[in-house]
Image (spheres, rainbow, N blue to C red):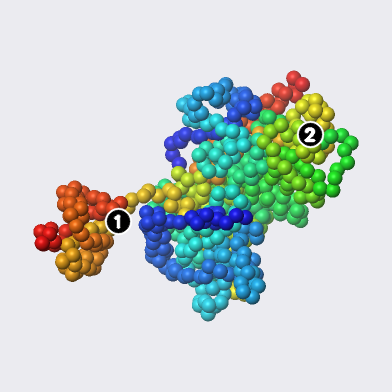
């Protein structure tokens, strides 16, 4: 490979300029503050983790993990999500901490995408995990918190769909008992959102009419509470009943939270089956082609780190949210202090006083005729409205010292 | 989700467009007959709250994945090659053909055969999964020439009637996939505009069924 040009960056990573950072910080702080008010405490974990522990436990497929070798030759991964690192912390440093634990995070995560896919290799996620509570209330709390965090992050219009992996698992086992390969084939189709392939596979399986219809109708199971009733007509195994009952309970708790108008039940929702064990959900903003948050219940993950416990959580796709929220919100007032060199101490003292009161202050000295001319022009232009100085916008101008003094 | 939003449909230009239009019209959706490229690329149908965009067939899935179109009509060949994250909702049964391995009859293959194709990802995956090692050469057109001029030992391409192959003295050695056009949908649109997409899907499904039935009686 030829040497990169000096300004080049690796594929999929980006710089954030001040305007974007201000937006990003508003999303981050809004979401984290919302989570704090729900009793979730923020933690920070390292960027690097062992491939054999966190790497193996994460949902990210192996080829999408960034791997490197440390000086001893051990394989390291750049964290691809935060759920597995948090599970590690809960099972180690927080081992003695009583459950349930409510933790939040904001972090950069890394995914290797196929060359030319144009996706971010590094992006931000802001999320929450509720560890040690297996109730429907916990699942509903996580969905309601996600809705609240999306609002706090500035996403004005969105909806959330939730489902349950147990329903499809149970239904497939009921209709295709013991036929794991065929079940996996059907799940694979759904995971790839290939409904045509799913129907084709079903036809090839030569099921009896009623069973086939039931499995085909799965593709249409979305809507409000009534979806649960329809789901019950399709299967009656223990796993199916348990999943539908939990969905109904979550729905009712979401009603008590007052967020039912934002959510829908969607049993076609497919999460990674090896990871999620119960409720799963995704959030969609109306102006964006990609989900803005996702999450679900993962009761088997903690056991991989030696502290079996139920858990449920979600992550906001913070970098995606950046695309949907509107730019300028209330930024602090920016003051420009221009001063004659002799007025230096006075200028800096004034700057310090204004900064203490929460304003953003920039100081610059006036040297020579051209600077003074510019200062007078700015004083004229910026009397009541923001003005530009050297490419930056300011709301207020303070000029200290006098031109005549310098001229002497 | 109250009120009816516009649904943006991306249609493939060229060969598939005519078949797709016939199907949409059969479903009661008055899509303009011609994909006149000199005119504007965006056409609206007010009564149905549909807006149509025309795109190169290979780009349809990309438009839909990024959400600039809610749904689209894409060949399975494109979906296999592009591997985009979209819903594949319905087999429209149009532009029916197959993707095949094609070659000159009676040729013995070298140890490391060269395969020319417009579908390098599909070809590479197919041969890997069949335990064969090949060198895949990406071409952008006139693929059937490659074996004749010695550029490749095999080609992977779409076969509709097989006439072009026969005219060039080529034979279809292996059918890889049956190909038809599919109705695809964006991940978010499929949830936020579910009622509309479902209605479109159902009327197209009925139209596709009657088209298939009509095809068998007339043939």
Q: Is residue A1 visible?
A: yes
User: Which residue ends up furthest to the bottom in the rendered image?
Assistant: A96
**Vertical position of residue B37 compared to residue A372: above or below:** above
A335 left or right, relative to A78: left
Q: How many dots with numbers?
A: 2
B37 left or right, relative to A69: left
Residue drawn at x 20%, y 59% as measured from the top left: A366
- State the separation of the CA atoms marked 2 and 1: 67 Å
Q: x, y percentage for residue A401?
A: 13, 62
For mark 2, give the secondary structure.
loop
Tell me the residue that label 2 is attached to. B149
Q: Are marks 2 and 1 on the same chain?
A: no
The residue lying toward the viewer, choosing from A40 and A83, is A83
Residue drawn at x 24%, y 66% as measured from the top left: A355
Residue drawn at x 56%, y 65% as measured from the top left: A79
User: Which residue ends up furthest to the front in the rendered image?
Assistant: A408
Q: Chain of mark 1?
A: A
Tell me the residue that label 1 is attached to. A331
For mark 1, give the secondary structure.
loop
Crowding at label 1, few (<14), some or many (≥20) Cα neighbours within 10 Å?
A: few
Q: Chain of mark 2?
A: B
């Amino acid at each position: 490979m030829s040497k990169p040009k000096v300004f080049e960056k690796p594929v999929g990573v980006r710089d954030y300029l001040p305007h974007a950072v201000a937006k990003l910080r508003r999303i981050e702080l809004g979401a984290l503050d919302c989570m704090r008010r729900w009793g979730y405490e923020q933690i920070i974990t390292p960027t690097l983790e062992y491939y054999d522990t966190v790497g193996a436990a994460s949902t990210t497929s192996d080829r999408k993990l960034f791997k490197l070798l440390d000086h001893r030759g051990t394989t390291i991964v750049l964290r691809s999500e935060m759920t597995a690192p948090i599970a590690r912390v809960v099972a180690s440093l927080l081992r003695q901490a009583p459950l349930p634990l409510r933790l939040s995070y904001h972090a950069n995560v890394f995914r290797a995408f196929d060359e030319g896919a144009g996706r971010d290799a590094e992006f931000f996620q802001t999320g929450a995990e509720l560890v040690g509570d297996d109730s429907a209330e916990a699942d509903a709390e996580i969905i309601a918190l996600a809705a609240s965090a999306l609002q706090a992050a500035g996403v004005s219009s969105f909806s959330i769909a939730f489902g349950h992996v147990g329903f499809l698992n149970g239904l497939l086992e009921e209709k295709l008992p013991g036929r794991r390969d065929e079940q996996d084939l059907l799940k694979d189709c759904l995971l790839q959102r290939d409904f045509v392939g799913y129907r084709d596979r079903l036809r090839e399986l030569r099921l009896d009419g009623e069973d086939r219809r039931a499995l085909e109708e799965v593709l249409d199971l979305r809507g409000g509470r009534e979806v649960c009733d329809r789901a019950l007509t399709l299967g009656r195994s223990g796993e199916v009943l348990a999943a539908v009952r939990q969905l109904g309970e979550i729905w009712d708790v979401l009603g008590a939270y007052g967020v039912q108008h934002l959510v829908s039940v969607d049993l076609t929702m497919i999460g990674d089956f090896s990871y999620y064990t119960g409720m799963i959900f995704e959030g969609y903003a109306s102006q964006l082609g990609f989900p803005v948050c996702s999450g679900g219940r993962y009761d088997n993950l903690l056991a991989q780190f030696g502290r079996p416990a139920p858990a449920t959580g979600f992550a906001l796709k913070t970098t995606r949210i950046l695309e949907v929220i509107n730019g300028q919100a209330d930024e602090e007032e920016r003051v420009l202090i221009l001063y004659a060199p002799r007025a230096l101490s006075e200028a800096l003292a004034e700057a310090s006083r204004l900064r203490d009161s929460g304003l953003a202050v920039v100081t610059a000295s006036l040297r020579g005729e051209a600077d003074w001319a510019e200062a007078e022009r700015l004083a004229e232009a910026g009397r009541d409205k923001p003005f530009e100085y050297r490419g930056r916008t300011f709301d207020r101008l303070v000029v200290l010292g006098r031109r005549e003094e310098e001229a002497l | 989700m109250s009120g009816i939003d516009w649904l943006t449909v991306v249609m493939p230009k060229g060969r598939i467009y005519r078949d797709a239009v016939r199907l949409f019209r059969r479903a009661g959706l008055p899509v303009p007959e011609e994909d006149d490229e000199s005119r504007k690329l965006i056409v609206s149908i007010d009564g149905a709250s549909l807006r149509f965009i025309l795109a190169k067939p290979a780009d349809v899935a990309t438009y839909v994945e990024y959400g600039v179109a809610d749904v689209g009509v894409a060949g399975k060949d494109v979906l296999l090659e592009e591997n985009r994250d979209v819903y594949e909702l319905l087999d429209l049964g149009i532009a029916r053909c197959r993707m095949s391995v094609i070659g000159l009859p009676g040729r013995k293959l070298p140890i490391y055969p060269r395969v020319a194709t417009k579908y390098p990802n599909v070809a590479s995956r197919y041969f890997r999964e069949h335990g064969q090692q090949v060198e895949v050469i990406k071409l952008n057109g006139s693929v059937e020439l490659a074996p004749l001029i010695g550029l490749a030992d095999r080609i992977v391409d779409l076969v509709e009637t097989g006439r072009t192959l026969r005219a060039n003295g080529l034979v279809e050695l292996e059918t890889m996939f049956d190909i038809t056009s599919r109705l695809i949908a964006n991940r978010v649109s499929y949830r936020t505009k579910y009622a509309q997409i479902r209605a479109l899907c159902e009327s197209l499904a009925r139209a596709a069924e009657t088209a298939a039935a009509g095809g068998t009686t007339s043939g």
